[in-house]
Amino acid sequence: MIGIIGGSGLETFPFSGQVEELLITTPFGKVTAKQSGNLAFISRHGEAHQIAPHQVNFRANIWALGQLQVTGIIATAAVGALNMSYKPGELIILDDFIDLTRQRPLSFYSHGAVVHTDMGQPFDRELNQRLSRVIQSETGQSPPAAVYVAVEGPRFETRAEIKYMNMIGGSVVGMTIVPEVVLAKEKSLPYAVIGLVTNYACGVIEQPVSNEAVQATMRHNQERLARLITAAATDQS
């Protein structure tokens, strides 16, 4: 079974079969999930998009998917392009990250034994290959592999921050993939992200960043993302 974590614009998942709603108790709180066939879905921000990025219960979500015994996780992410190499509406995958978050629980091992998790390959190669295949089959082009810069949110970034992110090797910016990817790695759950570029980050173009525009772009692509995730989850190539 593949776990799906839906981000902004994918607060619900259009399952094709019968859906079972689950309430999963974890050491970090309760999580509502939906399961249909070989897919299990958790809405990162809640179905009404009521949970801000810095308030997401990342540990509970990953723990819950572990309890469901998923064999891998595919997450979605709305990302801002740090430069003109990426275009709004473009699909990407992630192959590395830079963590600029400040106050999030970053580990399941905050008490007791200290665990140091290797992050040399944070995003799973096999799941990334699956995502690449299904994206290429639709667009005719292999998606670029980007370096994700994680920020605290919920505010957007300043021009100076975006300049800094470019200087340190970032490709796109977002507010949710860290600590999600770290926690999945701690639980030995293969994890990959299908990202949708929703906007240029602050200062890349003159137009201001708009949350409404970001949400509209994600919702416009909701069915497309769900279709690609379903195809990747069942891909046996």
Image (cartoon, rainbow, N blue to C red):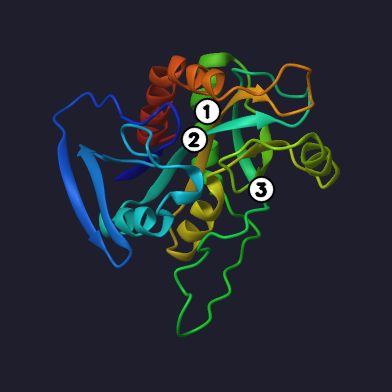
Asked if labels 1 and 2 touch by Cβ distance under 8 angstroms, the answer is yes
Q: Earlier in the sequence, mark 2 or mark 3?
A: 3
Q: Is residue 12 above or below residue 109?
A: above
With 44 as the anchor, is 100 left or right in this view? Answer: right
Question: Which tag is nearer the camera, tag 3 or tag 1?
Answer: 3
**Picture residue at 61% right of the left edge, 38% below the top:** 155
Q: Position of residue 193 (x, y in %)?
A: 52, 39
Mark 2–mark 1 distance (CA, rounded to whole Å): 5 Å
Q: Amino acid at mark 3?
A: Asp
Q: Which residue is mark 1?
A: 133
In the rendered structure, find residue 96 and report the number of the disc placed on it.
3
Asked if labels 1 and 3 touch by Cβ distance under 8 angstroms, the answer is no
**Quadrant in the rendering for residue 122:** bottom right
Mark 3–mark 1 distance (CA, rounded to whole Å): 19 Å
| Quarter of the picture holding the N terminus | top left
Q: Is residue 134 above or below residue 26?
A: above
Q: Amino acid at mark 2?
A: Arg
With 220 as the anchor, is 203 left or right in this view? Answer: right
Q: Is residue 91 above or below residue 220?
A: below
Q: Position of residue 162 (x, y in %)?
A: 77, 37
Q: Which residue is mark 2?
A: 130
Q: Position of residue 33 (x, y in %)?
A: 25, 44
| Quarter of the picture holding the C terminus | top left
Q: Amino acid at mark 1?
A: Arg
